Amino acid sequence: MESERNKYIIVATSLGEEISAARVLELYRMRWEIELVFKRLKSLFQYGEVPMKRDKSARAWFYGKLLFAALCETLVNTGRFSPGRDKQTG
């Protein structure tokens, strides 16, 4: 039997009445995917703390990590790399 709370989705928006409920849900899903990417970046690539205090060093560190993450994400999505897969069994 389906739970009563699984029948409704409530989303608040300030976008106005000219946007459909389906579009609001689509945008919310996209936003949630972005949040999940940032969560994964923080946990896998340790984006939580920047080890440098100088602006240029911190920016270089961040862009290096971002480039590495984009490369890994591309490899995972093309099926050429799996961080959880053992090299011998892979």
Image (cartoon, rainbow, N blue to C red):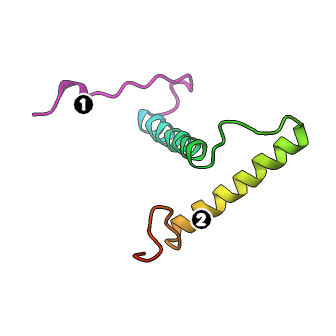
Where residue 45 sits in the image (x, y, percent)? 62, 49
Compare residues 7 and 51 and report the one nearer the observer. Answer: 51
* Type of amino acid under label 2: Thr
Residue farthest left in this picture: 1
Residue pointed to by mark 2: 74
Picture quarter with the C terminus: bottom left
Compare residues 78 and 20 and report the one nearer the observer. Answer: 78
Counting other residues with Cα less than 10 Å from the Cα at mark 2, is it few (<14), some (14-19), or many (20 or more)?
few
Q: What number is the disc on residue 40?
A: none
Secondary structure at badge 1 equals helix
Compare residues 79 and 16 and report the one nearer the observer. Answer: 79
- Name the residue rendered at 60%, 46% in the picture: 41
Picture quarter with the N terminus: top left
Residue pointed to by mark 1: 6
Q: How many marks?
A: 2
* Nearer mark to the viewer, of 1 and 2: 2
- Name the residue rendered at 59%, 65% in the picture: 74
Secondary structure at badge 2 equals helix
* Type of amino acid under label 1: Asn
The vertical placement of 6 against 31, above or below, is above
- Name the residue rendered at 51%, 62% in the picture: 83
Magenta segment: 1-19
**Distance in Å between CA atoms under marks 1 and 2:** 35 Å
Q: Is residue 18 magenta?
A: yes
Q: Quadrant of residue 71?
A: bottom right
Q: Is residue 82 magenta?
A: no
Position of 65 with respect to 74 (left or right) is right
Where residue 29 sits in the image (x, y, percent)? 46, 41
- Which secondary structure type mostly characterizes the magenta part of the structure? loop
- Name the residue rendered at 76%, 54% in the picture: 64
The vertical placement of 4 against 48, above or below, is above
